[in-house]
Image (cartoon, rainbow, N blue to C red):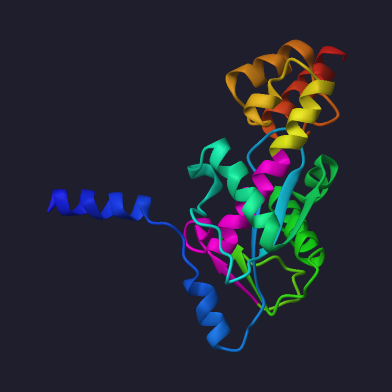
Amino acid sequence: MAHQIERAYSEAMTRLPTYDHERILQAQGCQVIAGVDEVGRGPISGPVFAAAVILDPKHIPIGLNDSKKLSAKKREALLQSILAHADVSVASASEREIEQINILRAAHLAMERAVAGLKQTPDHVLVDGNIIPRNLEIPATALVKGDSLSVSIAAASIVAKIRRDLVMCDLAQQFPGYGWEKNAGYPTAEHLKALQDFGVTPHHRRTFKPVHNILYQGKNLNC
């Protein structure tokens, strides 16, 4: 029994996303299906990004998967295939927007902006997660772990991650020492030490605990 469970788990982990959800929707009359995913909810610095992708059913890149399961080289190769044949839109919500409306709402705002930026208006949107963005006026379905289930969402996850990583690399040039080119703004030991040593930058999310604590500590020291 233990061996069967282990084998089933292994198969689930290696199973690639499919176009099945899209085909079901197309059979119901929805011809244009967009997949949407966000990247960057966990970092303590940098914007949150989202991408929306409408794949061409005749040109679905082979090997699409959750971006976190792919090497950087594989993501780059897939990105070129996605851009060559798909309708792609990328959007973001800034650090200040994250502070003002909270990270979940900001991630949804980025998703809404990405969908609005598509050249085509989708008939239906497949959203990664368990909540549909409140201002998404197009019919939508939320898929938990959608980037492992739907190739459209997987494609969106790849596009969003690459775009955000590029932005964080650019910011790392402006603010060296925080390691953003490697940690993408996540609270690694290196990043947290730099936060203590060099302080808070304009690109840190001030409502996130490690950053808030530094700011609060500084205020107390000045009292």
- Place residue 194 in its image quadrant: top right
Q: Main secondary structure of the magenta part?
A: helix
Does the rendering let one see residue 130? Answer: no
For the N terminus, the image quarter is bottom left
Question: Residue 159: x percent and y percent?
Answer: 67, 50
Does the rendering let one see residue 70? Answer: yes
- Residue sitting at x 80%, y 22%: 173
Question: Residue 95: x percent and y percent?
Answer: 81, 40
Q: Is residue 127 above or below residue 15?
A: below
Q: Is residue 150 above or below residue 72?
A: below
| 78 with respect to 166 (left or right) | left
> Is residue 40 a member of the stretch shown in magenta?
no
Question: Residue 55: x percent and y percent?
Answer: 63, 66
The magenta segment: 140-164
Q: Is residue 169 above or below residue 145?
A: above
- Place residue 72 in its image quadrant: top right
Nearest to the observer: residue 170 or residue 195: 170
| 209 with respect to 176 (left or right) | left
Q: Is residue 107 above or below residue 134?
A: above
- Residue sitting at x 55%, y 58%: 61
Nearest to the observer: residue 49 or residue 99: 49
- Residue sitting at x 80%, y 49%: 93
For the C terminus, the image quarter is top right
